[in-house]
Each structure stands twice: as structure tokens, then as C-alpha cells.
Amino acid sequence: MQNVERLSGLDASFLYLETPAQLMHVCGVLVLDPATIPGGYSFTALREEIARRVADVPTFTRKIRKVPLGLDHPVWVHDEHFEIEHHIHRLALPDPGGYDELVELTSHLAGLPLARSRPLWEMWVIEGYGDKVVVFSKMHHATVDGVSGSNLISHLCSLEPDAAPIQAEDEPRPYEAAPGRRQLLVRGLVSPVTRPVLAARLLSPSYSLIAKTVTRAVQGTAMAAPFTAPRTSFNATITAHRSIGFADMDLEDVRAVKDATGTTVNDVVLAVAGGALRSYLEDRAELPATSLLATVPVSVRDNSVRSSGANKVSALFARLGTDIADPLERLVGLAVSNRNAKEHQRAVPADALQDWAEFAAPRTFGLAVRAYAGLRLAERHPVVHNLVISNVPGPPFPLYFMGARIEALIPLGPVFHGAGLNITVMSNNGKVHVGVIACRDSMPDVTGLAERFPKALAELRDAVGA
């Protein structure tokens, strides 16, 4: 029996954070080779096979139901009227069907909200990209984080064109009847009773963490602090318009730099991002004197004691060395500060963010976000952080989406008021795919940034070789 599940505070927070301009879905661009599909490509067959595979996967077939009066976080209920046609759509690129046409179309799709009356995901099958087929996917952040999103896509992928999916559901299980208004009201009245107990349990470790942070700050080993970022043109109130760009790097080049310098893949990725951003801003006469500050999501799934909830993440702050011209010096400095930041982040209990998010009140949180955007407060206080950067490890071998070989797997995260730029890097079968998404009104030339990543890696590789 599939139980009715209450959203965790962190999952629900992504619903409360959403406004018409600040959309909280994550996207993905899958570039597919349809020549490997047994029997050939057909949109109808593709849609029918997706429908078959997602039918018994609750994450694909559940929708949110609010608790009356906003007394508690919403619950997931099975969508009894689920129709695959509401979630799989077909489009074709205009001539000449190249990169420019693809990023223009996907940028438009990324700026459209998901309908909350249905399961919170969509896929757009885009034809006409040369001899390739592109699948542009959207899933709400309330449904997935980086790790759970990868697990979810495994229901649709296989290791061979005609093989079974990597992860398949067991025997179909019946769904529990959706709760009625009265039952939800009772849930909403009972849940707040436990919050004072939770608050008391969280206070002691929070005080301990503050003490440790002060000690680290004195010793110079604390991670970079929020609200210390320089202001750039993309640190403003965002609109609903999006711009997308992507590029590829060679994973062997990243590993060669890592091995030669005794650093980590993540250190190299952040150093390359710092080099790309430095070049981008310098060419526009916007380079700040101090380094940009990035928020780097960190999965705590392996250490979490929570059994429920889609999002199990923490975060650390990292300076990207955009104030350092020499790429090798930038990497060495980043490696040291990253070690300190990771040690600092590990001192935070794995479920701290999830626990504190339980206190996000639906009505108050939503009103606060809208007031923050309406008053353009992001432009009035010190910059919290400049951007979000995620590094997601992917499969080291080829994957097949419904029989079509995946040639590129490009993830794209959300952007926020005050930080209108998100960079996600994902490895896949020897390549490192870089996905960049931004608010179009503050960063229209996203491709101009994305195409600098391979160049920044080449500069770093050459500096290491020298």
C-alpha cells in the first residue's frame, strides 16, 4: 500500500519559495542518438514506453494536496486522473535546427511554471536537432534533489538499448485513498504540537555549532561567510525569463589536473568555474576586486537519519578565486579553502537544514518571499552569494534513454532573487557536461559564459604542465 506522505519542511519550502519569477523546478537537457533505438524512433512509441515505466513509480504519479488553512505542510496523494499526455509533449526546432535554436527554445520552456494540479514534472521531446532527438525535462525541486533525481531517471534508462531499466519497481502496489478535508485538518492541528519539542532538541547542537564557527573564524579555518559577496549584474531581483547555455569538457583533462596537483575533481571544477567567470566579467569590465562567492550544495543522504523527504542536502560557501589571474594559483588556493569548508560543513548535523525547515510556515513564508521580491530587497542588502554551483557525479559508462544512447546529459538548477545564475556540472561517460542557466534580463549571454569553461580548463591544464 502506498501511504499518503507529508512533505518534509525542506521539500515544502521549495513550494513556498516559488513565485512567477522564482521558479523552483530543476531541468535537464538529454541529447539522444535515436539510431540505437531497436525498431527505430517513434514519438508515439517513446511516449507509450515512458507511460509504462512510470505507471507504478509514485514520484511520477503523485501530486500535492494542501492542508486546510495552511496549518501544516502539504501531502503527496496519488493522481487518480494521471494522463501521460499532460506530461510528455512534442516539438520541433525551426531551421537550421542548431545550438542557437535549441537554447532559445529550452530557455523559453525553462521559464514556464509547472501546473500544481498535476504531478510536478514534464518532458518535451524536441526533434530536428540535426540527426539527434533532445528531451528537455522539468521536475519540481519539492520532488527531487540531485541524488534522488538521478535515481528517478534510472527508471527510464538502461545499460543497453534493449535492456530493462536500471531501476524498476517491484510488483504494482495499490494506493491509499487520498485523505479528505477533515483528515487533513486533523493532521494540520496535530503536527504543530510537536514543533516545540523539535526546537528544544535543535537548540543545543546549534549553540555548539556557533561556538565552533567562532573558533574556526579566529583560527582562519572557517568557510567563507554569506553576505560577504561582491555585487555583480546578476545579483539582483530576477524575472521569469531564462537563458540557457551548455558546453562539454574532457573528464580525462580534469582528472589529469587533479592527479598532478593532489587536489580533487570538485576543486578543479570550482577553479575552472572561477576562471570562466573571471574571463566573462573582465571582458565586460565588471570584474570585482574581491572573489565571487558560490553556494555549493552537498548531499547528506548517506548520513541522514530521516527516512522520508526527497531533498537531503546541506551546503557550503566557496570563494572561486576570480580575483586571482594565475589559474594554478587559483586552484591551489581553492583546494586549501575547500578542505576547510568541508571540515566546517561536516560539523553541521546532517539533518540540520531539514529539521529547521520544518518551521517554515506555509502562509508566512510565501508572503515573505513575495514581499522580498516586490520591494526588490535583494538589491538593498549585502549580497548573500553570487551564484549556485553543483557538481554531480554521473555514470562512467554509456546510458540509453528508451533505447536511445545518451550523448549529453546537462542538468540545470533554479535561480534565485539576488543570485540569478546557476551552474551545474555533471560527468557522463568520459565527458563533463556544463549547464548554465540565468535570469535573461541580468545575464542574456549565457553561452558566452558556458563556452569559457573548456578554455579555462585548457589554461589550467597548460599551467600545470608548465
Image (cartoon, helix red, strand yellow):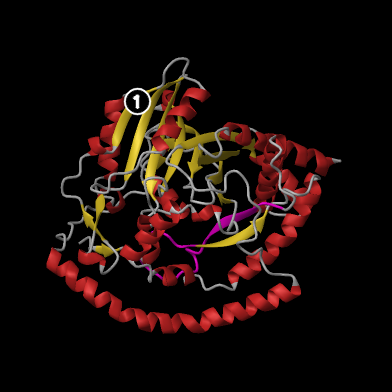
User: Looking at the image, which residue is at 59% across and 56% down?
Assistant: 383
> From which residue to which does the magenta span run?
291-313
Q: Look at the image and tell me in which quarter the C terminus lies.
A: top right
Q: In this view, does 93 lie above or below 187?
A: above
Q: Inspect the image, locate mark 1, and give the three-letter code of the amino acid beneath it.
A: Leu
Return the residue found at the far top.
Answer: 95
Q: Nearer the viewer, residue 63 or 167?
A: 63
Instruction: Indicate the position of residue 380 as horizontal and vertical percent values.
Output: 55, 56
User: Looking at the image, which residue is at 66% across and 38% down?
Assistant: 453
User: Looking at the image, which residue is at 18% across and 70% down?
Assistant: 185
Taking the image as shown, residue 140 lies to the left or right of residue 170, namely right
Neighbor class of circle 1 (other Cα within 10 Å; few <14, some 14-19, many 20+) is few
Taking the image as shown, residue 119 lies to the left or right of residue 199, namely left
User: Label 1: which residue?
Assistant: 91
Quarter of the image holding residue 361? Answer: bottom left
Instruction: Indicate the position of residue 347 as horizontal and vertical percent values.
Output: 59, 73
